[in-house]
Image: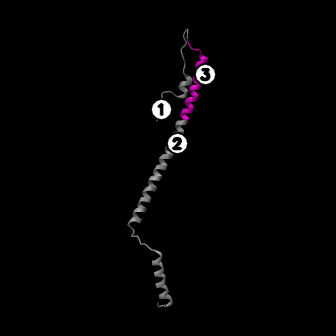
């Protein structure tokens, strides 16, 4: 991926030779500058690899969360289709009273 977009490698920069003419550059200055470029370039490559790793983790998290959403939607659909039985305290007391009548033979 990066090789298609980045023209120079660290080795290309390190091995670069400049021609010197009568009013040319000082080789020491060029070497110092290239050392800075190489250091930055290596850091750039490191950062890009970290970002790629983070991106892959986010993609995996996204897939996992989408699957979880699908599962929860299916469960919600099942709950929506299930008839709602509303039970309140008065209903429970009536049921208990009826059971007591059956068990204890009480007639009110």
- In the image, which is nearer the foreground, mark 3 or mark 1? 3
Task: Return the mark for residue 30.
Answer: none
Callout 1: 10 Å neighbours few (<14), some, many (20+)?
A: few
The spot of residue 28 in percent (x, y) is: 61, 18
The spot of residue 11 in percent (x, y) is: 55, 27
Rounded to the nearest whole Å, what is the CA distance between mark 2 and mark 3?
Answer: 32 Å
Residue shown at the point (38%, 66%) measured from the top left: 81
Using the image as rendered, state which of residue 6 and residue 71 is in the foreground. Answer: 71
Residue under circle 3? 32
Residue shown at the point (49%, 44%) measured from the top left: 56
Callout 3: 10 Å neighbours few (<14), some, many (20+)?
A: few
Mostly what secondary structure, the magenta segment? helix
Q: Secondary structure at mark 3?
A: helix
Using the image as rendered, state which of residue 44 and residue 6 is in the foreground. Answer: 44
Residue under circle 1? 3
Using the image as rendered, state which of residue 26 and residue 76 is in the foreground. Answer: 76
Rounded to the nearest whole Å, what is the CA distance between mark 3 and mark 1?
Answer: 26 Å
| Residues tagged 2 and 1 counted as in contact (Cβ below 8 A) | no
Rounded to the nearest whole Å, what is the CA distance between mark 2 and mark 1?
Answer: 17 Å
Q: Secondary structure at mark 1?
A: helix
Above or below for 61 versus 108: above
Choose top left, top right, bottom left or bottom right for residue 21: top right
Q: Earlier in the sequence, mark 2 or mark 1?
A: 1
Callout 2: 10 Å neighbours few (<14), some, many (20+)?
A: few
Q: Earlier in the sequence, mark 3 or mark 1?
A: 1
Q: Which residues are magenta?
A: 24-46
Residue shown at the point (41%, 65%) measured from the top left: 79
From this viewpoint, which residue is outermost toward the top? 22
Magenta-drawn stretch contains 32: yes
Choose top left, top right, bottom left or bottom right for residue 4: top left
Q: Secondary structure at mark 2?
A: helix
Residue under circle 2? 53
């Amino acid at each position: 991926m990066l090789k298609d977009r980045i023209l120079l490698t660290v080795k290309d920069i390190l091995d670069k030779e400049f021609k010197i003419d009568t009013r040319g550059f000082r080789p020491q200055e060029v070497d110092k500058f290239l050392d800075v470029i190489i250091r930055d370039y290596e850091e750039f490559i490191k950062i890009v690899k970290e970002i790629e790793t983070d991106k892959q983790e986010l993609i995996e998290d996204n897939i996992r969360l989408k699957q979880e959403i699908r599962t929860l939607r299916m469960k919600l659909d099942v709950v929506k289709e299930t008839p709602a039985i509303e039970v309140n305290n008065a209903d429970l007391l009536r049921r208990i009273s009826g059971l007591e009548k059956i068990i204890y033979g009480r007639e009110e």
